[in-house]
Amino acid sequence: MARRTFHRAPEAERRHDLIEATLDCIAEYGLQGATVRQIAIKAGVTAGLIRHYFQSKEHILQEAYRIVIARLTEKAERVTGDPETRLRDFIVINLTEPVANSRSLSLWASFISRVSVDPELAAIHREGYLSFRNALEGLLGDFLAARGEDASPERCRRLAIAINGLLDGLWLEGCLAGELFGESELVEIALTSIETLLGLRLRPVDATGADH
Amino acid sequence: MARRTFHRAPEAERRHDLIEATLDCIAEYGLQGATVRQIAIKAGVTAGLIRHYFQSKEHILQEAYRIVIARLTEKAERVTGDPETRLRDFIVINLTEPVANSRSLSLWASFISRVSVDPELAAIHREGYLSFRNALEGLLGDFLAARGEDASPERCRRLAIAINGLLDGLWLEGCLAGELFGESELVEIALTSIETLLGLRLRPVDATGADH
DNA sequence: GAGCCTATTATACGCTTGAATAATTTCTTA
DNA sequence: TAAGAAATTATTCAAGCGTATAATAGGCTC
C-alpha cells in the first residue's frame, strides 16, 4: 500500500500554508466548515500534520484571527506623506480592495461571532480595534493641526469615534452588498462625509498618478 | 422506565420557544454550540421534537435569523411623531438597549458570517438591509422637506448611505466595546455627527419626559 | 551512500452530530 | 369515558468530529 509522497517544508512556510488553508475554509464554508480534515485537504496535507504544528484547533483559529486583523489594518497603518495625504489614503484603503470585499467580511464576522465565546479571541480583537482607532486619531490630530484647527484630544477622540464608525459601517455595507453601489460611490461618500464632519475640504485627488 | 411527562403546546408557542432557545444557544456558545441537542435542552424538550417543527437545522436557523433582523429593525421602523422626532428617535433607538448590546451583536455576526454560505440567509439579509435603509431614507427626506432643505432623491440616497453607515458602525463599536464609552456618549456623537452631515441642528431633547 | 532525525502519513478511538424511526402519552371530541 | 389524532419522547444510525499514537519516508550530515 503505497504511501503518498510528500516534501518536508520549513516550519514557517508550512504554518503559513495551514493558516491560509484555514482562512480559505472559513471564507468558503463558514467556521463550521473549517474542520481539521477540511483544512488539511485544502493545504494538501493530512489531518495529523495540523496537530504537529498547532496545539489544538483553537490555537490555529487564534493564529488565523491575528492574520485577519493584521491584513485589515496593516495597509491603512502604513500610509505615508503629508497629513492630508495620509488621512485620505487611510480612508480610501479601508474602502477598496483588498480590505473591502466579501471574503474579508466573512472572515471578520466569523471571528467576531466568537469573540464573546473565546476570551483569547476577545483579547486579540480589542488590541486590533484600539490600535486601529488610535491610528485614526493620530491622523486626524496631525491633519487638524496642519490646518491650524482645534486639535484638542477631546475633539480628536470624538471625531475618531465618529469617523471610525462611519468607515466601519461603509466597509460593512460595501462588503455585504457591493453591487448596490457605484464604482467608487462609497469612497466618495466617505470622503465628502468626513470633510463635512471635519469642516474642512481635502485637496482634489492628484489624477496624474504621480504618487504611485 | 418512566418516560418524562410533557405538555402539548400550541404550534405557534412551541415554534417560538424553540427559536428562542436557538438564539440563546447561539448567543451563549456561538453557532457551533447551537446543536439540535443543545437547543432541545434549552427549550426543555427532547431533540426529536425539533425535527417535528422544522424540516432541518438549516430551516430553524433561517427562521431564527428572521427574528433577529425583525428585532433589530422593528422598533426603529415604528417611530412616530413629527419628522424631527421620528429621526431623532430612530437614531437613539438604534444605539441603545435592547438593539445595542453584545447579545445582539453575537447573533448578528453569527448569521452574517453565514450569509455568504447560505443563499437563503443572504436573501433574508438583503431584504432586512434594504428595508432599513429605505426607512432611514424616508425619515431623512421628510425631515429635510419639513425644514425646507434640498430633499432630492439623489441627496437623500447619499445621506442615507452615509448615516446608515455611521449608525451601523457606532452600533458595532458600542456592542463590541461598550465599556470604552461613556453612558450615552455614542448617542451624543451620533446626534451631533448627523446634525453636521445634514447641516441642520435638531431641537434639544425635551427633558420633561412629556413624550413618554 | 549510510544513518539519523523528525516532518509527515496512516490508522484508530471515543464522542458528538443531524437525522430517521419506533414507542408512548397527552388532549380533544364525540 | 372511550377513541383516535398527533405531539412528544426514546432509541438508533451512519457520518464526521478533534485528538492520540504508531509507522514511514524525506532530506540533512558525516
Image (cartoon, coloured by chain):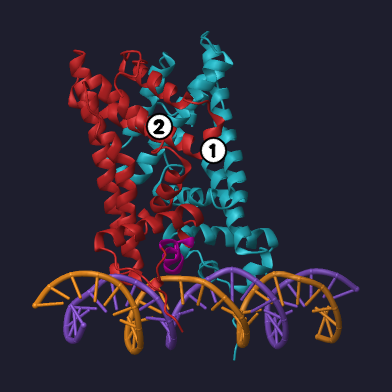
Chain colours: A cyan, B red, C orange, D purple
Q: Is residue B93 above or below residue B67?
A: above
Classified by dominant secondary structure, the portion drawn in magenta counts as: helix
Q: Nearer the viewer, residue A112 or C2?
A: A112
Q: Position of residue B127 (x, y in %)?
A: 25, 47
From the viewer's perspective, tell me whether residue A13 is left or right of residue A94. Answer: right
Q: Quadrant of the N terminus of chain A?
A: bottom right
From the viewer's perspective, tell me whether residue B202 is left or right of residue A67. Answer: left
Do the dots labelled 1 and 2 sit on one chain? Answer: no
Kindly indicate the quadrant of the structure image that contains residue A83: top right
Q: Position of residue A86 (x, y in %)?
A: 52, 25
- Disc 1 residue type? Lys
What is the chain identity of the residue bearing mark 1?
Answer: A
Kindly indicate the quadrant of the structure image that contains residue B149: top left
The number of discs equals: 2
What is the chain identity of the residue bearing mark 2?
Answer: B
Of discs 1 and 2, which sits in the foreground? 2
Q: Please name the residue shown 24% across and 30% down the image.
A: B137
Q: Position of residue B101 (x, y in %)?
A: 45, 39
Q: Are marks 1 and 2 in contact (CB under 8 Å)?
A: no
Q: Is residue B75 above or below residue B199?
A: below
Q: Nearer the viewer, residue B53 or B146?
A: B53
Can residue B149 be seen here? The reply is yes
User: Which residue is under mark 2?
Assistant: B95
Q: Which mark is residue A75?
A: 1
Q: Which residues are magenta?
A: B33-43
Q: Residue furthest bottom?
A: A1
